[in-house]
Amino acid sequence: MRNPALSLFSIALLATGPAATFAGGPAAAAANASKVLDYRFFVAGGVCAATSHGITTPIDVVKTKMQAQPEVYNKGMSAATLSILKDEGPSALLGGLGPTVVGYGIEGAMKFGIYEIMKPIMADAFDGNTAIAYIFASIIAGGVASILLCPMESARIRVVTDQDYKGLGLIQ
């Protein structure tokens, strides 16, 4: 196996321009990956993540309120849900739906899309050792996706827990 640090360094050199592209190796794999970029992975990941997290927003609202106010919601999920419905109405269970759908749409798109792009690059960097290559591809994709999710997740938590943000959407 080639030196992984040297291989990853050559991937980084690709970002400096065409002069850094080598005849073979990870840089060539990165260049080829950008030529065959398949948007379907991004779309599929984004739609699936946005849908699945959007559907589970009421559960997330109850969980977030239980974490933010454990002294109020201390009798379990069912009791907390009934208390929220009684005190705030059914619409409270959809608090933060906008940031959730947008945030996880972006997160899912990046996680799936970047993973598919990074697989051949990492496979070349690790001389075809697909297990290690796919692990590194998933680490990179997950890291990028998580960083991009943070602002929307922060907005969701504020909409659910902070009265000053209650009822606000993404645009207000």
Image (cartoon, rainbow, N blue to C red):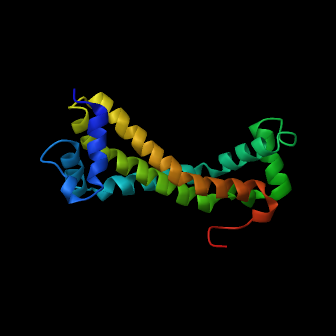
Residue pictured at 72% horizontal, 57% vertical: 158
- Left or right, residue 118 beside residue 79: left
Relative to the observer, which residue lies in front, 170 or 154? 154
The image quadrant of residue 54 is bottom right
- Left or right, residue 30 beside residue 103: left
Residue pictured at 80% horizontal, 64% vertical: 164
Q: Position of residue 42 (x, y in %)?
A: 37, 55
| 81 relative to 169, above or below | above
Q: Position of residue 6 (x, y in %)?
A: 27, 36
Residue pictured at 24% horizontal, 49% vertical: 30
**Is residue 158 visible to the viewer in this orientation of the structure?**
yes
**Is residue 51 visible to the viewer in this orientation of the structure?**
no
The image quadrant of residue 34 is bottom left
Relative to the observer, which residue lies in front, 27 or 99? 27
Question: Which quarter of the rendering shows the N terminus?
Answer: top left
| Residue lying furthest left | 23
Residue pictured at 80% horizontal, 51% vertical: 84
| Residue lying furthest bottom | 172
| 92 relative to 135, above or below | below
Q: Position of residue 159 (x, y in %)?
A: 72, 59
